Amino acid sequence: MLKEVWGQSYSEQTQYLRVFVAQLRKKIEEDPNRPKFILTESGVGYRFNTS
């Protein structure tokens, strides 16, 4: 996702992605600390839950 959105030079900047996901959660989640839509999967990344 980093490479596709921000380009190759950001592919190692994982903190950017964490900040971006946190900002999205603040906007769409009822409780950003207990997300229901943007879920973190250890060792995989993020998943958008539609159920």
Image (spheres, rainbow, N blue to C red):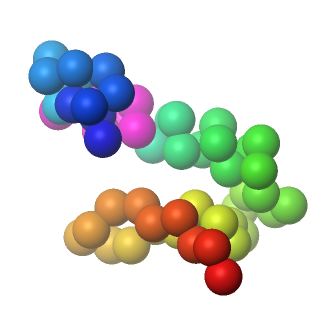
- Reply above or below: 23 against 29: above
Stretch in magenta: 12-17
Screen quadrant of the N terminus: top left
Q: Is residue 18 left or right of residue 25?
A: left
Q: Position of residue 34 (x, y in %)?
A: 71, 70
The residue most toward the right is 30
Q: Position of residue 21 (x, y in %)?
A: 54, 44
The stretch drawn in magenta includes residue 24: no
Q: Position of residue 35 (x, y in %)?
A: 68, 67
Residue at 33% from the left image edge and 73% from the top image edge = 42
Residue at 45% from the left image edge and 66% from the top image edge = 47
- Reply above or below: 28 against 43: above
Report the label total: 0
- Reply above or below: 51 against 3: below
When asked about the image quadrant of residue 30, the answer is bottom right
When asked about the image quadrant of residue 3, the answer is top left
Screen quadrant of the C terminus: bottom right
Q: Is residue 12 left or right of residue 24?
A: left
